[in-house]
Amino acid sequence: MVGGEAAAAVEELVSGLRQATDFAEQFRSYSESEKQWKARMEFILRHLPDYRDPPDGGGRLDQLLSLSMVWANHLFLGCSYNKDLLDKVMEMADGIEVEDLPQFTTRSELMKKHQS
C-alpha cells in the first residue's frame, strides 16, 4: 500500500508541475527563443508562489513578470538597468543555469580599448 501512496503523491506532484507550466506558458513572448523562454519560465515558476496576486488584486504577478523580463533582457540582450534592480534579479535567478550565453561589450569597455 505504501507504494501506491508514493505513486499517487508523485502523480499529484507531476500534475501540479504540469498545471504551473501551462499557467506560465501564457506569458511567453512571441519573440523569445526556446532557450530564452525555458530560462525565463524557470525564473517565473521558481518565484510564482511568492508573487501570486492577492484576492484584492495588487499586481504581484505583474511585478514578477517584469522582473523576469529584466533578468532575461540583461542576460540575453545585454540591457543595463539600475544596480539595485540587477542585484535583485540576479539574486532571484541564482542557480538557474543557462548555457551558451552571448558575450556583450559595454560602451565604456569599447572606449577604454580605443583609448589604449
Image (spheres, rainbow, N blue to C red):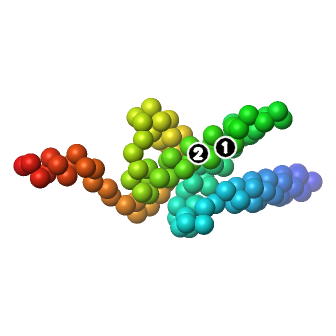
Q: As rendered, which of 3 and 61 lies closer to the eye?
A: 61
Return the residue at label 1: 62
SS class, disc 2: helix
Tell me the residue at 70%/55% (across/down): 24
Instruction: Name the spot of residue 69 as percent of width and height, x first.
Output: 54, 50
Q: Residue furthest right?
A: 1
Q: How many marks?
A: 2
Reading the image, the residue beneath label 2 is 66
Residue depicted at x 60% and y 53% = 42
Quarter occupied by residue 76? bottom left
Q: Are marks 1 and 2 in contact (CB under 8 Å)?
A: yes
Q: Nearer the viewer, residue 35 or 111?
A: 111
Percent position of residue 86, x then y: 45, 39
Give x and y (percent) for residue 91. 49, 38
As displayed, is residue 101 above or below residue 48?
Answer: below
The answer to which image quadrant residue 82 occupies is top left
Q: Amino acid at mark 2?
A: Ser
User: Which kind of residue does numbered mark 1 sit on?
Assistant: Asp
